[in-house]
Amino acid sequence: MQERMRWRVPRAWLIPLCVAAGLFVPSSAGAISSAACNARANDTPGKLVPCIQTNDLWSHMQALQKIADDNPSPADGHPSRNSGEPGYKASADYVANVMKKAGYDVTIQPYKFTYYAYQAPPILSEVSPTAHDYALSSEWNPGQSTGTANADLQPAGGIVIPPTPTPSSSSGCTSADFNGFVPGRIALIQRGTCTFGTKVLNAQGAGASGVIVFNEGNPGRTAVFSGSLSDANGNPIIPTIPVGFVSFATGNDLYTQYQNAVQANTALPHMNLSIKALVNPNADDYNVIAESKTGDPNHVLVVDAHLDAIYGAGMLDNGSGSVTILDIAQQMKHVHPRNKLRFIWFGGEELGLFGSKYYVNNLTSTELSHIGYDLDSDVTATPNYVIGILDPAAPDFFGRTVSTTFPSNVYEPSKVSRDQSIQFFDSIGKNHELFSPVGTDAFSFNVAGVPASGLLTGQDCCKTQDEVNLFGGTVGNYEGNLGTSDGGCVDNPFRWCDNLSNNDPRVLTFMSKAFANTTVRMAFDKTVMSSSSARAAKARAAFKRRAMAAKRARAARAARRFPSR
């Protein structure tokens, strides 16, 4: 599939891509000293790419790891660079200081968000009559909620067992489903036709001390799952009673235990559900923005990475991508680009692209019209790596299906950087695959009408056999359970293992060189970038329509990964 998409490049867009002699060099070019790199204007791939060196990259990685170590999370006490925590602010200050010293104009853009962080691993257990501790991830998942419940279980009304072939259960969807509910008990509710938040709010209104939602049991709705909590209008909520999600088999077992106990007039199932978390609905977060002093301000190239982590130090996701563009910016400090360079380190990406959405949505129509392109660096040092190149028409990284499509004024120019990266990896004998920008900060720009591409090496959780065939390595993840897809280190709240050891300096180096190649080429592009004003002005007029389409697409993706109902 990747090969078919790879060669679908109209000739009109290939013309500016032709690789002129001396403008492109593979990463195997001869070594040059850091002092020589620091003294010259690295304004071509032939100059810039050799100056992207492992020692410089790794020095920044070590600095970010130290920041995480020196700033433990106020929630769980582990090293952290999570948004809303001291380690993230220290990371933003570090990047800002480096960029100021390199001669860029630096601003820090603040915004607010709702901070949520686990203080301890959540607990779900059956105390009696059958003692059982449910294992996180494999047997249950916590909802974003707080509280402790140690109480008997009671099912809500509307449970449909056996389940119908398609979703039909309205369990917990109305207050009537809690008629006769004994306050203080833990409500057992079946997944079904209304939002999880609606079910939880109704349970909370009936006096429930906690909620266990079990999968409905229809095809595709049987396994352990995670759900997002929102009310009937789609507004996110954080209930003050604990909420857990379990499989249909577990829910059916608990439901049967309850029915048998009622019939036999014996003790009801007694459960313990505890989720301890810190919540701040008005937390501070920051974007770091650094601009070149030269370059046409009417034609801006944005080069971005998200600086925030989630659940820990976040050295792979996304200390690596942040370091990639930080080193490139330093090595380009003497360059006088044709187009204005705007390096941005976004916050809140892990929480829902908060930083990039805030940035894009707060641009004036004129400011947006001046942005001609975006390049996104999101994870660049995975040991068990893939080589992913962002393409707006490609499959999503997680869903592996195409969930979002873009008009030709976004898609066609997005292929320019895409094909520059393809050429680079071809030149060093490495394969690639194409991924959609969905789930990356590039998506925020695509939605606003700005073409974008970028690079990624994938998470450490879920490499497929097809990808092993392309890139080598092993199926699964990196941190000790190769051959399985057990979640890896990143995006996992209870492992805290996304540290320096979860990064490969060699991969970081060749990916950063590839990113440097397309960055410097786009910095001097006069074909794509010169059309930015007219294109983005038209895009702004249709922004609301595309934003609504993107919102629906995000809701569909969330329904697959973290469904709301």
Image: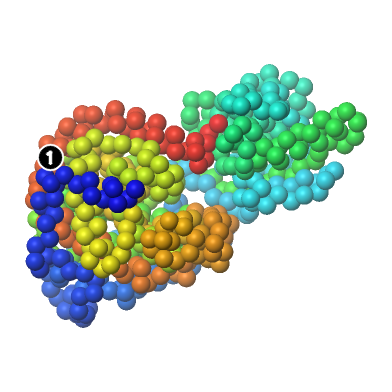
Crowd around label 1: few <14 · some 14–19 · many ≥20 (10 Å)? many
Rendered image quadrant of residue 191: top right
Residue at the (91%, 30%) spot, across then down = 265
Q: Quadrant of residue 229?
A: top right
Q: How many marks?
A: 1
On screen, residue 420 versus residue 273, left or right, reads left
Q: Residue at x 46, y 56 (%)?
A: 464
Q: Is residue 141 visible?
A: yes
In the image, residue 370 sits, relative to residue 18, either above or below, namely above
Tell which of 145 and 249 is nearer to you.
Answer: 249
Q: Position of residue 101 (x, y in %)?
A: 23, 67
Q: Position of residue 4 (x, y in %)?
A: 29, 48
Which residue is pictured at 26% across the width and 50% down the height? 6
Image quadrant where one finds the C terminus: top right
Residue that numbered label 1 is attached to: 533
Residue for point 71% across, 32% down: 187
| Type of colouring | rainbow
Q: Nearer the viewer, residue 552 or 328?
A: 552
Q: Is residue 364 visible?
A: no
Does 160 sit left or right of 463 as displayed? right
257 left or right of 472 in image: right
- Where residue 322 appears, as percent x and y from the top left, is 34, 60
Give the residue type that dot 1 points to: Ser
Q: Position of residue 279 (x, y in %)?
A: 54, 45
Q: Secondary structure at mark 1?
A: helix
In the displayed structure, would residue 560 be above or below residue 453?
A: above
